[in-house]
Image (cartoon, rainbow, N blue to C red):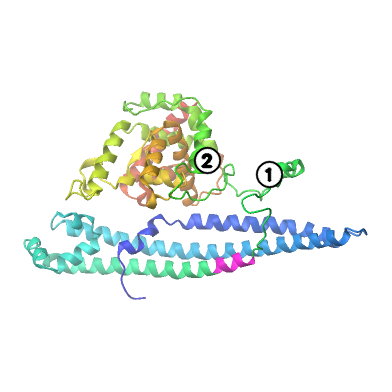
Amino acid sequence: MSGQAHHEDVAFLAECSPALVERNADEFRRLRDLLVEVAEPARRAETRTQWQSEGSRTYTGRLTEARQLVTHLAEGFDRAAAALYAYAMALTTARSHYDNGRRSERALAALIAAKGTAVTRTAQAAEPMRRWEDMRAATGLLDGLAELTLDVDDIREEADRLHDCTGDDFHRARTVEEEARAVCVHALRQARALLPDYRTGAAGRRPDLYAAMAALRAEGAEARGGPLTRLPGSGPVPGTYGSAGPDVLVSPQLRDVRMRVAALPDAADTYWTPVVTDAMQADWIARNKELLRAAALHAGLPEDLLAGVAWQEVGGYQPGFLDDVTGALREQAAAPWGLSPVTPENLPWRLGGRPDETSYGPLAVQLRRGAEVLGYDPAHLTDRQRAVVEEALQDPRQNAFVAAGFLARIKAECGLADVPADLMTPAQMREVAARYNGGPYWDLPKAQGYGDRFAPDLDRARDAMR
């Protein structure tokens, strides 16, 4: 495998989770198993029922159709599961190459930084590979004048090595993922072709048979406790929603959160007053314990985990109004007419970061993460959608539900999806908390320090919830 790639070519891998792909494969396999379980009773009903009447032929025909439907659905879900399992394995390999490239990239960035600080917006925004390519070869008169004082000969050999290692690893990651994705998509299309194309009712007016027939509702209630009705470790089965398009202001997920919090008492807030002592943290959790308990239950999480994260976040020494200030400054820096030549990531102190990485609310949920949990596409948020998400995160009650939803996603991403809430260990909760703080870089010292603080504070958070 030869060639090179840049970080921008594989940046999406930071958000890819093999564990979540496997979880989707598990869901397809669960449906396959459920259908297989139905297939045998369907076959017995078709072949062992003997009676004669004017409707017997129609009855037998309908049973045959139902059995064939179940068989084809089971085969389709089985093939889809196999395709996703294979893609998850390849994605794990691609992520390992990506992580190797990120380590080389960080080393290259540190080496370049020893020679000077980027001044222009273009240089600040460039990834380390691009910056080194620019530094080692002047591309024009102005470029040469800007780098006239830089002596890079003493780092050239090491920088070239790190540049090539980074590019090689990113290329491997891109190649492995692209090839596996092509195979997976092809297999999923084949699986979809096995699914019967059946429709009920006129377009847009499907009959709700489950709601209309008491016998079906009773059967559903009876089967709800079966092992195949949902995967182990899952919380309450949520509604099935699509992604909110650009014309959708209030997503179904956000509407659901609003309905749930409407039945809960008002929450204590930290918008104007920072929480700076252990006693204040304990008081905040105690006053909001009903909210935290409801949000954790809805997400299928241990309430201790959510309370422990709340203990860390509400004690962040930063009142909520400063989040608004941070967000406004980042947006100004990102705008072409803004704080040039400073990019948002290079603003000083805690101000540095992309606008959609700004955290809001008591549990400090990043805007882009909140958008994902609430069913929006973070990469294509309209200004009005961004304002709606920001408003939801600033409401302490909605903020708790969004934070719980994000924690549930992290729990699944780190291979703990099948661990029931009441069986999660303190070590597992510590890992989820570290990932909540650090995201893809949860293994770096800052996020690990967050996890180290979370562990001893967990007992105090539990006490406050009593």
Mark 1 neighbour class, 10 Å CA radius: few under 14, some 14 to 19, many 20 or more: few
User: Closer to the N terminus: mark 1 or mark 2?
Assistant: 1
Instruction: Depth check: give the residue in front, 114 or 116.
Output: 116
Amino acid found under the numbered disc labelled 1 = Arg
Q: Secondary structure at mark 2?
A: helix
Residue 289, image x, y percentages: 48, 28
Q: Which residue is mark 1?
A: 224
Residue at coordinates 20% horizontally, 46% vertically from top-left?
338
Label annotation for residue 383? none
- Region of the chain picked out in magenta, as a range: 187-194
Q: CA distance from mark 1 to mark 2?
A: 18 Å
Prevailing secondary structure of the magenta residues:
helix
Q: Are marks 1 and 2 in contact (CB under 8 Å)?
A: no
Asked if residue 101 can be seen in this view, the reply is no
Quadrant position of the N terminus in the picture: bottom left
In the rendered structure, find residue 299 and report the number of the disc placed on it. 2
**Residue 352 percent coordinates (x, y):** 25, 45
Judge by depth and name the residue closer to the eye, 252 or 454. Answer: 252
Q: Is residue 433 left or right of residue 323?
A: right
The residue under label 2 is which amino acid type? Ala
Is 192 part of what is drawn in magenta?
A: yes
Assign a secondary structure to mark 1: loop
Q: Is residue 110 left or right of residue 207?
A: left
Residue 390 visible (yes or no): yes
* Residue 30 quadrant: bottom right
Q: Where residue 238 sits in the image (x, y, percent)?
A: 57, 44
Query: In the shown orientation, is residue 143 left or right of residue 303?
Result: left
Residue at (79% x, 57% y) in the render: 41
* The residue positioned farthest toward the right in the image shown: 52
